């Protein structure tokens, strides 16, 4: 971090509204945790308000230890995940009372409970609420925030959306106390292509509050150029003059060749998979993002006897029942492996063990979608098989690096791309003594996406 900026912000103090924050796992927690880490490294104080007692699909305590804020307060919510947490707690106590011992199996079933409902039913439950399904966190988070603001001299409130309720908490606190507000758009709110409103009234309420949030904000950040352009076009009066892009990125310290303790292998391909072409996908599937077309392409190649014999596919993450059914097709059981959720660092280790990486972004309204894994994929130096909109922002970025890009919903196109990818990035590498084994030199075009450099941009706004 620049010394000049550090000196200018030496006594700066931030109140961060973050529903998702370590030890909760997932991309939202990683973005905010890493932001907190590098802000604190520069001497900026960061206090956090996060959610209390929810049943969540994944926890990463290693990330939490790395990204500690100065102080963190937890506010209760009453959404579906809180109800599931209470049910689990009651069941665990009941089991202990009658059996006299702790139900270890039940304590490990967070993911089973979280993902037990089909996606369509989860969506219906989530869409009942106005703004979003975390709205019942608003009162409690606002109460905790007012208490902190009265006892601390914060320079700015930073609220990260989604959930959009976080932005609403920031808006209410800023309005009541006059503290400047900075909104971090990780996802579109009313312009989210995957957002479905139950009624016109639900949309009206959300649009009303989005306008208020933007108007109250001193500054706004968002995760990509397309999102920035779309928000600028919609909110011409309030958005363009006080906004900038802060990409998701990679943390170089996560990619340092490390010990077994951190589960990060060397940058050389693991011997046990050196004889196979291993393609890995990390992360979740939801709504229109699906592995269906990719799996159909594998079945097509198998039927036509064109499937590369040394091809292995790995999916790492927690999956809803709909995706599990697709991935566990009996005709693909010898080809596709489903690996449960891994902590962030362990997941990066799995990436580094791979030949290539898979990326899925649906074509419908996906032009501006930039999943956070893209930048870690690029940092890994592994070639990418990207099933993404070919005119979208993700394709424009990936095009500058080793990759094969194909249509997300064309089974035939995906099938041909799998064969081409295997030929281009595995067969040729085999002939050239596994060039993929060599350490990957970082170019300036990739370095600009580091978490440290993106935090520096954020600090420039504070300055």
Image (cartoon, grey):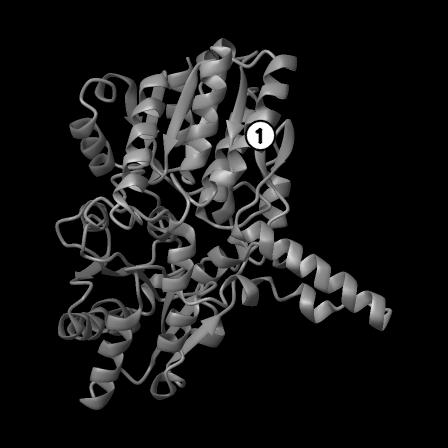
Name the foreground residue: 234 vs 221.
234
Q: Is residue 409 left or right of residue 63?
A: left
Tag 1 secondary structure = strand
Q: In the displayed structure, would residue 320 be above or below residue 195?
A: below
**Residue at image coords 62%, 59%:** 260
Q: In the displayed structure, would residue 236 be above or below residue 11?
A: below
**Residue at image coords 18%, 29%:** 234
In the rendered image, is residue 245 in sight?
Answer: no
Name the foreground residue: 365 vs 390.
365
**Residue at image coords 45%, 58%:** 267
Q: Is residue 54 left or right of residue 211?
A: right
**Residue at image coords 42%, 45%:** 129
The percent position of residue 115, horizontal first and vertical second, equals 49, 64
The image quarter in which residue 95 lies: bottom right
The percent position of residue 405, horizontal first and vertical second, equals 18, 60
In the rendered image, is residue 166 in sight?
Answer: yes
The image quarter in which residue 404 lies: bottom left
The percent position of residue 435, horizontal first and vertical second, equals 32, 63
Q: How many marks?
A: 1
Residue pushed farthest right? 100
The percent position of residue 67, horizontal first and vertical second, equals 58, 37
**Quarter occupied by the C terminus:** top left
Q: Residues within 10 Å of mark 1 (few under 14, many from 20)?
A: many
- Where is mark 1, residue-wise? 48
Q: In the displayed structure, would residue 12 be above or below residue 375?
A: above
């Amino acid at each position: 971090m620049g010394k000049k900026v550090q000196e200018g912000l030496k006594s700066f103090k931030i109140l961060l509204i973050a529903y998702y924050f370590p030890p909760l796992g997932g991309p939202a927690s990683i973005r905010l945790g890493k932001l907190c880490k590098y802000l604190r490294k520069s001497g900026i104080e960061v206090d956090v308000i996060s959610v209390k007692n929810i049943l969540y699909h994944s926890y990463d305590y290693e990330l939490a230890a790395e990204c500690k804020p100065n102080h963190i307060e937890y506010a209760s919510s009453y959404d579906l995940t809180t109800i599931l947490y209470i049910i689990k707690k009651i069941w665990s106590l009941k089991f202990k009372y009658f059996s006299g011992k702790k139900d270890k199996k039940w304590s490990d079933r967070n993911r089973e409970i979280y993902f037990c409902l089909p996606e369509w039913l989860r969506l219906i439950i989530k869409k009942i609420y106005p703004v979003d399904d975390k709205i019942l966190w608003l009162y409690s988070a606002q109460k905790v925030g007012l208490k902190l603001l009265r006892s601390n001299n914060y320079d700015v409130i930073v609220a990260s959306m989604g959930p959009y309720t976080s932005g609403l908490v920031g808006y209410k606190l800023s309005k009541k106390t006059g503290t400047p507000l900075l909104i971090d758009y990780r996802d579109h709110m009313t312009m989210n292509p995957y957002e479905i409103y139950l009624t016109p009234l639900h949309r009206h309420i959300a649009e009303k509050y989005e306008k208020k949030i933007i108007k109250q904000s001193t500054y706004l950040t968002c995760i990509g150029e397309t999102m920035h352009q779309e928000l600028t076009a919609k909110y011409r009066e309030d958005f363009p003059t006080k906004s900038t892009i802060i990409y998701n990125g990679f943390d170089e310290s996560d990619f340092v060749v490390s010990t077994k303790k951190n589960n990060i292998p060397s940058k050389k391909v693991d011997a046990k998979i050196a004889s196979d072409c291993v393609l890995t996908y990390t992360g979740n599937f939801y709504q229109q993002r699906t592995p269906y077309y990719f799996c159909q392409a594998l079945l097509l190649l198998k039927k036509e006897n064109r499937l590369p014999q040394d091809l292995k596919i790995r999916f790492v993450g927690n999956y809803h029942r709909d995706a599990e059914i697709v991935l566990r097709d009996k005709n693909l059981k010898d080809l596709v492996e489903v690996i449960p959720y891994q902590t962030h660092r362990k997941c990066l280790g799995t990436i580094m063990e791979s030949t290539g990486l898979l990326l899925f972004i649906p074509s419908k309204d996906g032009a501006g979608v930039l999943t956070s894994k893209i930048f870690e994929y690029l940092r890994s130096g592994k070639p990418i098989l990207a099933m993404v909109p070919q005119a979208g922002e993700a394709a424009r970025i990936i095009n500058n690096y080793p990759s094969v890009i194909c249509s997300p919903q064309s089974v035939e196109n995906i099938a041909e791309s799998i064969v081409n990818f295997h030929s281009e990035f595995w067969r040729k590498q085999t002939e050239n003594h596994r060039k993929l084994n060599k350490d990957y030199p970082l170019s300036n075009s990739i370095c600009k996406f580091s978490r440290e450099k993106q935090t520096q941009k954020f600090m420039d706004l504070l300055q």
